[in-house]
DNA sequence: TTTAACTATATTGTCGACAATTTCATAGCT
DNA sequence: AGCTATGAAATTGTCGACAATATAGTTAAA
């Protein structure tokens, strides 16, 4: 169903995914220091794989590292949120525009079907699926852009940081009904191959989302 | 003068910078395999630092890696160039818009001064400075956006790949005179705090640049 | 001849130990 | 008291060796 990018195969891969999850979910506190030896005992792997995992986390902007000093989990700030969403708005808006041009008819049909399923679930009260549904929706449009760099930046880079803000500010999938309507309009624009409109609607959709989060942060 | 992001301190840092340079400049052929043991003897460091360097190169999209198989230098393709410049156009256009809002008056003044110096050098025939001048110009605007994510994406990620295309297609700083005029207009828009115009001009500037490279690639 | 299995080789992944650097505490000096 | 210097402890960086995996070559069977 969902394409999880690439299943982790090596030990460093798995540790990276674990660590990333623990950071995003707040198991490892924002701003805390990452001790290599400590983590190596916690996750039962050698320091080498911890180091490799930390390096990848740094590339994701989830941790910051100083030479000969160590790595710390990033801190969540209002300015950071604004900057992050500025970039996200531009990139995902662009993704929507490209998706309108590059997605196949079948992919669009599948996207519409996904939205219908999502709608049914929301209506019948399965609200715990809404987060996953939202993620899947955005993910498909991103991939639909067919632009390698864009996909990589959004899924590897920005996405997890966005989720970290949402999780740690305690937004369990907000704005369900309104967001759903916005999703529908975006898909409609893509189906009509109207890239400009799709971009505009996506940017607005993300802007609303930002405002919603920002209110909790203040 | 120029802020080289961060001076490499550790051995892995230096090796990373060296490797990156050799890849961008074509010393290491595009598409070639990177043998860890071979590189460790070539650069006189242990395999561990080579591995760390390769990991960072992967984060820059300069090499691609498969688990248990190895890393290869990316290949340069017309589609890759188009996709790269699509992203670059959007991001650097955004940078120009943000720079118009966020650069200090002094930073703008310095940028104008830089452009004047550049102009003098071009006029007196010091054409070997044009590449560095162009880079410096774009770099200052990117930093002037004051957006951490944007800066990181452009300077760590996209920038070196762009340079790799330019170098390996043998463009030794093309479009000097015309590009200079475009630069002047962009700075003017920034000085006038006209973000929309700055973005539009920057996007057009980069689009021209892409077309110029694309011609050589076909 | 082609295919399949197996062995040998080479390459990547992981580990523990050592070296270099930073950090913290203590002592000495003005 | 405050500041600097010195040294010990802890942490990160680097290295070589071993384990796991993939690749290539060879042999054997259909």
Image: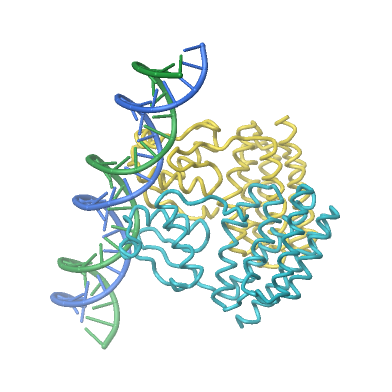
Chain colours: A cyan, B yellow, C blue, D green
Viewer-proximal residue, B107 or B22? B22
* Left or right: B215 in relation to B41: right
Residue B9: % across, % down: 39, 52
* Left or right: B181 in relation to A3: right
Question: Does residue B189 lie above or below A208 as drawn?
Answer: above
Residue at the (66%, 65%) spot, across then down: A133
Residue at the (59%, 35%) spot, across then down: B75
Q: Quadrant of the N terminus of chain B?
A: bottom right
* Left or right: B51 in relation to B20: left
Residue B31 location, quadrant: top right
Viewer-proximal residue, A6 or B31? A6
Residue A185: % across, % down: 81, 65
Question: Does residue A199 lie above or below B123 as drawn?
Answer: below
Residue A88: % across, % down: 66, 63
Residue at the (63%, 69%) spot, across then down: A131
Residue A199: % across, % down: 78, 59
Viewer-proximal residue, A160 or A188? A188
Viewer-proximal residue, B184 or A217? A217
Question: Does residue B191 lie above or below B176 as drawn?
Answer: below
Q: Quadrant of the C terminus of chain B?
A: top right
* Left or right: A95 in relation to C1: right
Question: Does residue A180 lie above or below B161 as drawn?
Answer: below
Q: How many marks?
A: 0
């Amino acid at each position: 169903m969902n394409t999880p990018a690439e299943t982790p195969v090596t030990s460093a891969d798995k540790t990276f995914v674990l660590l990333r999850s623990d950071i995003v979910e707040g198991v490892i506190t924002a701003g805390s220091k990452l001790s290599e030896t400590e983590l190596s005992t916690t996750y039962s792997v050698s320091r080498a794989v911890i180091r490799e995992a930390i390096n990848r986390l740094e590339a994701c902007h989830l941790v910051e590292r100083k030479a000969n000093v160590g790595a710390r989990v990033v801190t969540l700030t209002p300015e950071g949120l604004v900057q992050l969403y500025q970039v996200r708005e531009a990139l995902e808006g662009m993704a929507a525009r490209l998706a309108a041009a590059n997605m196949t008819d079948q992919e669009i049909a599948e996207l519409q079907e996904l939205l219908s399923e999502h709608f049914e679930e929301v209506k019948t009260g399965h609200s715990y699926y809404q987060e996953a549904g939202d993620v899947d929706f955005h993910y498909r449009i991103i991939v639909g852009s067919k632009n390698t760099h864009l996909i990589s930046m959004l899924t590897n880079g920005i996405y997890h940081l966005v989720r970290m803000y949402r999780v740690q500010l305690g937004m369990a999938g907000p704005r369900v009904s309104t967001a759903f309507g916005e999703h529908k309009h975006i898909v409609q624009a893509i189906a009509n191959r109207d890239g400009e409109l799709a971009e505009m609607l996506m940017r607005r959709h993300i802007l609303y989302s930002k405002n919603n989060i920002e209110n909790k942060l203040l």
